[in-house]
Image (spheres, rainbow, N blue to C red):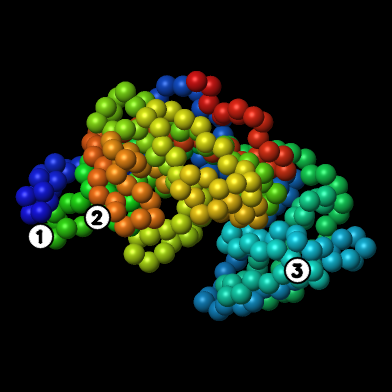
Amino acid sequence: MRILVALLALTLAGCAADTTPSPITGGEPPATPATPPATTPGSTTPPPAVTGDRLVTVRGHVLDQTVAPIAGADVRVVGLELTTRTDTQGAFEFRKVPAGILTVQAYAPGYLPANATGPADGPFRITLQPGAPAAYQLTYAFDGYIECALEVLIISPSCDSGIVALTNGSVQAFEQNFTFPFRADLGWRSIVVDVVFQGSQNPGLDGLRIALRGLDEETPGGAYEQFGRWHAPGSFTVRVDAEAETYPYGVGPIPGNYTGFRIDAYPHGHLYHQACVPGSQTCFLGAGAGTSIRFEVFVTVFMMEPAPEGYSAVAR
């Protein structure tokens, strides 16, 4: 084991994952900002104003224009990405929310989305007007660059930390992944992810893999839950739909009222799937190496209506 660690330390000397996206030349990506705001067209949703460390319970009701409660409406605290659904009385509640001025958004099928802004300890009353919300879409564009990656061991049970390095005489995990955060409004129906990667430029790798996760979801020990994971040796497109199905290596359908997401992108070693079964305790192999790994990720969120069949934001 000491020989292996020493070999890996020599291989990784001077090699690091650059966590600052680097521009990529060639091609014409969609003309969108890297992190556009996810807001309902025609409305403004300022971020919450947090005051100190005091935590409060946010309560309120979602009603229609006749003051009748709307059950099953999706509700979120804008900026904090806390989401829930109303009960049969149209009531909702969020616990342990930082005090301050908050914006709460509500949406239900057959109604136009609406916001309410006020003190966190409210209460909030959101009235929805009947109507068909206009469909629209948001595209997030990200550049990725990993200076060097070496994947030799898949460490159980997460199966996603493949590099070890010798630092000051101790073995430490070596960060090799990129994380791209993005948000959706309530009422999203589809998310299409385009990964642009020239696998032929990195023959030591078996392509890239991406995982779709919750924005702030973390669990002890480095393990985590994910909505799905995909891999290909070159460019590929992934589509997910709200509450439609379970995707490969996912934990279940993606809740339609979930609004905060992240995509993790990893170098993918050869033999990874043949030797490692996520969720098991027998993850050992997976080998690959690459340098100057450049790629692009385009995330398109379709609001109110699902994405057209075969949609891709990148013309290949």
Mark 3, secondary structure of its residue:
loop
Q: Position of residue 287 (x, y in %)?
A: 23, 39
Q: Which quadrant is home to the N terminus?
A: bottom left
Question: Which mark lies nearer to you, 2 or 3?
Answer: 3
Q: Left of 98 or right of it: where is 282? A: left
Q: Earlier in the sequence, mark 1 or mark 3?
A: 3
Say which residue label 1 marks: 169
Determine the CA span between mark 1 and mark 3.
56 Å
Using the image, determine if residue 280 lies above or below residue 135: below
Q: Position of residue 94 (x, y in %)?
A: 64, 71
Residue at (40, 25) in percent of width and height: 25
Say which residue label 2 marks: 173
**Quadrant of the image occupied by residue 105:** bottom right
Residue at (37, 30) in percent of width and height: 233
Q: Is residue 104 visible?
A: no
Determine the CA span between mark 1 and mark 2.
13 Å
Q: Left of 33 or right of it: where is 105? A: right
Q: Position of residue 316 (x, y in %)?
A: 50, 20
Using the image, determine if residue 3 lies above or below residue 32: below
Say which residue label 3 marks: 87
- Around disc 1, counting alpha carbons within 10 Å, would you say few (fewer than 14), some (14 to 19), or many (20 or more)? few
Q: Earlier in the sequence, mark 2 or mark 3?
A: 3
Residue at (57, 28) in percent of width and height: 312
Mark 1 residue type: Gly
